[in-house]
Image (tube, rainbow, N blue to C red):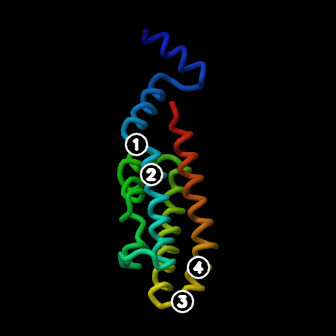
Amino acid sequence: MMGLMNGIAGLFGLSHTEKKQKVHIHEAINFMDGINAHVKCKVHLLNHLNGSSAEPLDPAVIGRDDQCVLGKWIHGPAFRHFHMSPIFYQLRSQHAQMHHIAGNIVEHVQANNRAAAEALMEGKYKDASRKVMKALTELNQSAKA
């Protein structure tokens, strides 16, 4: 049976060890949880920007990339599995950039400068968010068994 698995994995360019490693990654990491966490944070920021959120946001916390669910995943289990992947480092960099921009958006909202906050949200934040989603998708594809 092991020979058959190695043969099948070989047809797809994967060694048996690589295939087992990719299965292990998907057992340890749920990419959809990461994507959903990213979307939830974006909605929370939008609600803060448009005034429909009663929860105050701290720009110092929002500006940190290791405080949200996705950031904890990036700095924890994802790092352990993908520390050798250039795609992972793109994700990590874009996620940090996105949080830096989010912190600036919150600062503008607190200073009653909604125009600047909205410009950041529609410009730099939207671009960084799109890049985070792209990198997450690429990382997921690279980990498929």
Disc 1 is placed on an element classified as loop
Circle 2 is placed at which residue position? 34
| Dot 1 amino acid type | Ile
Going 55% across and 81% down the picture, which residue do you hit? Answer: 117
| Dot 3 amino acid type | Asn
**If you read the primary sequence from the N terminus, does the residue marked by circle 3 or circle 1 appear first?**
1
**Splitting the image into 4 quarters, where does residue 114 fall?**
bottom right
The answer to whether residue 97 is above or below residue 4 is below
| Dot 4 amino acid type | Glu
Q: Using the numbered discs, state the Cα–Cα distance from disc 2 to disc 4 in whole angstroms.
A: 25 Å
**If you read the primary sequence from the N terminus, does the residue marked by circle 2 or circle 4 appear first?**
2
Q: Are marks 4 and 3 in contact (CB under 8 Å)?
A: no
Give the crowd class for mark 4: few <14, some 14-19, many >=20 residues within 10 Å: some
Circle 3 is placed at which residue position? 113
| Dot 2 amino acid type | Gly
Circle 4 is placed at which residue position? 118
Task: Please provide percent x and percent y for residue 106.
Answer: 46, 80
Of all residues shown, which one is farthest toward the front? 52
**Foreground tag (2 vs 4):** 4
**If you read the primary sequence from the N terminus, does the residue marked by circle 4 or circle 1 appear first?**
1
Give the crowd class for mark 2: few <14, some 14-19, many >=20 residues within 10 Å: some
Q: Are marks 4 and 1 in contact (CB under 8 Å)?
A: no
Q: Are marks 2 and 1 in contact (CB under 8 Å)?
A: yes
Task: Please provide percent x and percent y for residue 95.
Answer: 50, 62
Disc 4 is placed on an element classified as helix
Give the crowd class for mark 3: few <14, some 14-19, many >=20 residues within 10 Å: few
Q: Using the numbered discs, state the Cα–Cα distance from disc 3 to disc 1 in whole angstroms.
A: 39 Å
Q: Using the numbered discs, state the Cα–Cα distance from disc 4 to disc 1 in whole angstroms.
A: 34 Å
Circle 1 is placed at which residue position? 29
Disc 2 is placed on an element classified as helix
